[in-house]
Image (spheres, rainbow, N blue to C red):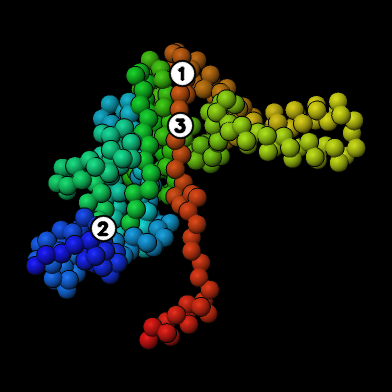
Amino acid sequence: MSFGTAEIKELRESTGAGMMDCKKALSETNGNMEEAVDWLRTKGLASAAKKSGRIAAEGLVAVSSADDNKAAAIVEVNSETDFVARNEQFQNVAEAIAKYAVKTAGVLEDLQEYKCDTFGKPVKDVITDTIATIGENINLRRASGLSVSNGAVASYVHAPVKPGLGKIGVLVALESTGDQDKLLQFGKQVAMHIAATNPEAMTREGVQADSIERERSVFREQALASGKPENIVEKMVEGRISKFYKEVVLLEQEYVIEGKISVQEAVDNFAKELGADVKVVDFVRFGLGEGIEKKEEDFAEEVKKAAGAA
């Protein structure tokens, strides 16, 4: 039995599966629509595709390091509920994905296509299979990686459910020729600081220009409202901007581990103890669900929908 674009479109709309999957399903079933639906369901493709529209804002952040500790990666794998995030299968998948992220330098597109030896298929297909098995939408939302030529990439996971898996994950890259174990220990402390303070950038140059201008505008309006002359206003604004930098720039923040000194001062002090130069070259911080808008339905409307479906 032959089939064309119209049949593929109909199957896609009824199952939510991808176009190529629908085409293959019709081909495998000689164009029989009902059998094609069943074929997709047995492959887990129809149910997975339908679930992919649901908002996944729970889940886990996972970190993994290379054997030589000169590279590490971090991923965020989302689920719909925290209950699934505590599921052992979900945790194993997140853990494996983080491991493969190290091999792909944290490049998300490459990671999706990476054929992992644990499952014998690309990461994106592992996620599809997991959706079908667990019954919730699962999404590999983002990934990143850091590496150094000399030194170490340290990591920290806040409130881990198991080693390397939690709600907040941080990587810190330290360039140095000093003892790597000591670098990893100090790097973990810096990562803990980053988890707590969530800095915007490493240095002033990394702060977004629009962020600075927004703060400058607010400070100027506040200063003008106080009735101060223009030359005094400018000094007040610059003073507030300097304070703003100390709040959002990592190396200028007060080091929460010790207090009273900046992160840069803590790095300098550690370098003296180590007997080698130390430079924090980069960091990555993932907080679970950052920027995801969770859908909130009106309870009365939800009841009305349920009644209509009954």
Dot 3: within a 10 Å radius of its alpha carbon, few (fewer than 14), some, or many (20 or more) residues? many
User: What type is the residue that disc 2 sits on?
Assistant: Gly
Whichever of labels 3 and 2 marks the residue nearer the N terminus, that label is 2
- The number of numbered badges drawn on the structure is 3
Q: What element carries label 2?
A: loop
**Image quadrant assignment for residue 239:** top right
**Residue at figure coordinates x 53%, y 73% from the top left:** 298
The residue where tag 3 is placed is 283
Left/right of residue 185 with respect to residue 217 in the rendered view: left
**Residue at figure coordinates x 54%, y 40% from the top left:** 198
CB contact under 8 Å: marks 2 and 1? no
Numbered mark located on residue 18 in the image: 2
**Residue at figure coordinates x 15%, y 64% from the top left:** 3
Q: Is mark 3 on a helix, strand or loop?
A: strand
User: What type is the residue that disc 3 sits on?
Assistant: Phe
The residue where tag 1 is placed is 278
